[in-house]
Image (cartoon, rainbow, N blue to C red):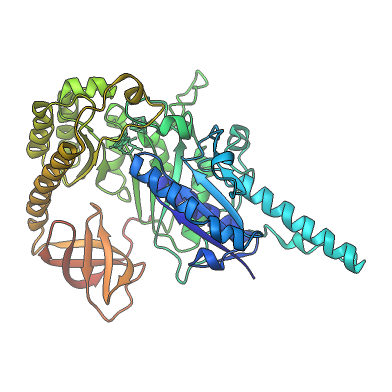
Amino acid sequence: MRTYHIWTIGCQMNVADSARLAAELEALGYRPVSRPEDADVVVLNTCVVRQSAEGRAVGRITSLQPLKTRRPLMVLAVMGCLVGVRRQDDLPQRFAHVDVFLPPSDPEPLLALLRQREQETRSKKQEATGNRQQARGQEWGTARVSQVTSPEAAAMGLIAPEPVWRLASCILPPVTAYVPVIYGCNHVCAYCIVPYRRGRERSRPVAEIVAEVQALVDQGVREVTLLGQIVDRYGHDWKGDGASAPPDLADLLRAVHGIEGLWRIRFLTSHPNYLSDRILDAVAELPKVCEHIEVPVQAGDDEVLRRMRRGYAVADYRALVQKIRQRLPDCSIATDVIVGFSGETEAQFQATYGLLAELKLDVVHVAAYSPRTGTLAAHRMVDDVLDEEKRRRLQAVEELQEQIVGQINRRLLGQAVEVLVEEQHKGKWRGRTRTNKLVFFRDDADWRGRLAVVRITWAGPWSMQGDVSQGVDHPNDQ
Ligand code: SAM
Ligand code: SF4
């Protein structure tokens, strides 16, 4: 039996890319194993958004060199942002033990290599035996679910011409799945390496996304999260035909909403400049779309935002949060913040801290600024906030947010919330509310993949616990 092992770090897009690659490998007859030592194919899916992530990726690649020396036939592939859409030139020299480098969201170079190796092995066997039986490889690629070829996607050169929308084998199929809907990013935020590594934005056709989600639902998935670096720019890269505007995220949400058997839809990450009224209306009107919006602010000071090249001011963000709360009163809002960006003074940091204290958002992903070679900030600005100071600011935001989210969650004590149950963890069922809050409960019944009504009995900052009272039929299906 041929085997594979995939190691993934980084964003949800990487998780989605790894899931798709796993499915593609399984369509070729490979089975997953948990240790690289047992695998015929090892894939490292990398992230370089911060130096710490790049360091981990490089460490992991280097650590596999002795294994590759011991097992030269093992195929070692490196994927993701370390490679980039333009494939960083120095990688083959730096990591001579790696067989193949895959750009983000593009498994094809590895699949082509495996097909070629299989072909060579088969030819050798046939030569040796003189046996001209039909090649076994014809069994390959027998995807059991619907496949839709997308000439547009294939033309972009980044998506395999025949995507396999099959879930990789697991003991139990997952309840939730990520679905990339727009690749790349056209913004050039001064600190961010993503546009250089993931390329310009490219939206996937609505029909292709709907077919993929339908295939996932046919395999048991109940919740999908539509992904993009700026997901609310979905469709902005298409020109209208003059008569009608190209579809946007609101149209996509409506199209995906029509899929029977799908219960929940999420989308992330939104950029404040593109979260239109049309999108908020779609969230408000479509029952399957969850009240949960991830919209990073990055800083709470106008001068820092200007130097970051974010394209909005603090007042714009504040107004957006107010609008979301008016239109979607129960919506949870998550944000990202970078502390210690080049030139960030104590007063500017305090402005960010003050904004977070004022807005009281549900989640704050906080990161210490990490200069990335190739970005505007790394070339033109000085990384002048000391590491120790960055850590202090990061910790201050974390402590503030712990208090805020603790208060928000305690308001749910005694209330009944709808939880989509994903799995059992240490004897407890674990799932998420529509607002993406983690809830645990104990019960003897099998709740996996079901909607439960849970009365909250304990609320901490990072999770809640409760008692299950009943199941929910899927009211959102027409
Ligand atoms: N597209 C999203 C947006 O508009 O904010 C975010 C995508 S970015 C890949 C994910 C997060 O990584 C960012 O929100 C930012 O907080 C963080 N990040 C990106 N570059 C960083 C850097 N150089 N140092 C620290 N954090 C960084
Ligand atoms: Fe990076 Fe800015 Fe694009 Fe987000 S919007 S991926 S932070 S460049």
Residue 192 is situated, as x and y percent measured from the top left of the image, at 35, 31
Q: Which quarter of the picture shows residue 475?
A: bottom left
Residue 421 is situated, as x and y percent measured from the top left of the image, at 31, 66
Which quadrant of the picture is home to ligand 1?
top left
- 423 in relation to 96, above or below: below
Q: Which residue corresponds to the image point at 48% horizontal and 49% vertical from the top-left?
A: 45
Q: Which quarter of the picture shows residue 68?
A: bottom right
Farthest residue in the right direction?
A: 130
Residue 260 relative to residue 473: left or right: right
Could you tell me if residue 90 is visible in this image?
yes
Q: Which quarter of the picture shows residue 313?
A: top left
Q: Quadrant of the N terminus?
A: bottom right
Q: Which residue corresponds to the image point at 52% horizontal and 43% vertical from the top-left?
A: 105
Farthest residue in the bottom direction?
A: 444
Could you tell me if residue 226 is visible in this image?
no
Residue 220 relative to residue 402: left or right: right
Residue 99 is situated, as x and y percent measured from the top left of the image, at 62, 49
Residue closer to the observer: 442 or 128 = 128
Residue closer to the observer: 450 or 59 = 59
